[in-house]
Image: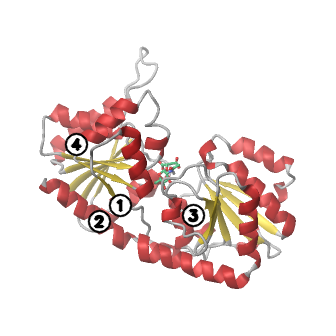
Amino acid sequence: MKIAIVCYPTHGGSGVVASELALGLAERGHEIHIVSYATPFRLRQFSQNVFIHEVEVASYPLFKYPPYALSLATKLADIHEEYNLDIVHAHYAVPHAASAFLAKQVLRCSKLKIITTLHGTDITLVGADKSFHRVIKFSIEESDGVTAVSNYLRQKTMDEFELQNNIEVIYNFIDTERCRGAGRECAREKYAPNGEKILMHASNFRPVKRVSDVIRIFARVRDQIPAKLLLVGEGPERLFVQQLTKELQLTEDVWFLGEQDYIENLMNCADLFLLPTEQESFGLVALEAHSCGVPVVGTRTGGLPELVIDGETGFLRPVGEITAMADSALTLLTDDVLNRKFRKNARERAVNCFDHQLILPQYEAFYDNVLGQ
Ligand code: GMT
């Protein structure tokens, strides 16, 4: 098949999923065209069957906001004319699904199928905003196929947009072999020279991730046992979080590591992953933790319980319950037998339910189905 994958190039989960999907499908012989405003970081190396198309947006003094959605639509129409695509697969509804629809209208080509994958904030935060709501509802309704990354997100979308569409759930996935090989570079001694326990968190440091809760949970843990915290990522809350770290006198024990292209090496250092997020449609980063055999302590919210099994692969507590999450973390960090059991369960959960070899065929089957419509 010839598939254009439209995505964001950043470290966010939707860009990572789209990139891994591109690489997986290319390996299975499909011709993949990546369309984005920059090359996604995981696709910077040459891969057979993957073509990169960067969207350029014209600037003009009249434009306060450069019209990216229009440039993207034009680019998609051009790519179709040159390569005769079967499918445009839009990852993240805003504005990708709308641009794909516009490209199809411009081409007047009913043969070209549009698939939209919903990732989370495109529905729960951005899509729900009044300024986008109608266009997003329309773009989803006009897609030839729609997938969501969890049952939670599927239901949330149906309710939010009062949709009649069929939305298929295809979970996010990971190459679980990658984690097995990683970790040699993980210098545990570098981050925890005196054998301290290592907790980790990775996110885009947006308010929805509640990174300040991570710090407060860590403060309670470190009061009880020697521990270090690795923080991965960048975002608007970073300065605030750094300030809080100072105020709580944790600077010596918290490592701010910035954005990392592959976090497996660091993840293999961790004894526990913290994800006290407000909302999470799936939680790809929790899957990355599980794939490396790292239990997760987080919140019972959104699609996270579809991945993290409370009491088996981690502990899930209500949003904002810092003390309960700190207690759960301490339980897992002080009981070695329990920790080993949870580590084994977490790894098995990733391998048995979310490995790329299981999920990629689901996307292929979905494409076949849509093309057969
Ligand atoms: O807001 C984010 O966390 C970024 C967003 C994205 O575009 O990458 O993440 C969403 O998509 C991921 C990939 O499907 C999911 O794993 C995340 O749970 C989801 N984030 C939220 O729902 C907050």
Q: Secondary structure at mark 4?
A: helix
Mark 4 vs mark 1, foreground winner is 1
Mark 4 or mark 1: which comes first in sequence?
4
Drawn side of residue 342 relative to residue 76, left or right: right
Residue located 79% across and 68% down the image: 227
Q: Is residue 59 depicted above or below 147 in this figure? A: above
Mark 4 or mark 3: which comes first in sequence?
4
Mark 3 vs mark 1, foreground winner is 1
- Closest to the observer: 194 or 245? 245
State yes or no: Cβ of the residue under disc 1 lies below 8 Å from any atom of ligand 1.
no
Mark 2 or mark 1: which comes first in sequence?
1
* Callout 4 touching callout 3 (CB < 8 Å): no
Mark 3 vs mark 2, foreground winner is 2
Q: Which residue is mark 3?
A: 263
Residue 174 pos. (x, y %): 44, 67
Packing grade of label 2 (10 A; few <14, some 14-19, many >=20) is some
Residue 295 pos. (x, y %): 61, 71
Mark 4 or mark 2: which comes first in sequence?
4
Q: Is residue 283 depicted above or below 187 in this figure? A: above
Tell me if I can see residue 30 in this picture: no
Packing grade of label 3 (10 A; few <14, some 14-19, many >=20) is some
Residue located 12% across and 45% down the image: 111
* Marks 3 and 2, how far apart at CA: 26 Å
Mark 3 or mark 1: which comes first in sequence?
1
* Callout 2 touching callout 1 (CB < 8 Å): yes
Residue 371 pos. (x, y %): 15, 54
- Closest to the observer: 332 or 351? 332
Q: Which residue is mark 1?
A: 170
Drawn side of residue 97 relative to residue 187, left or right: left
* Marks 4 and 2, how far apart at CA: 26 Å
| Residue type highlighted by circle 2 | Gln
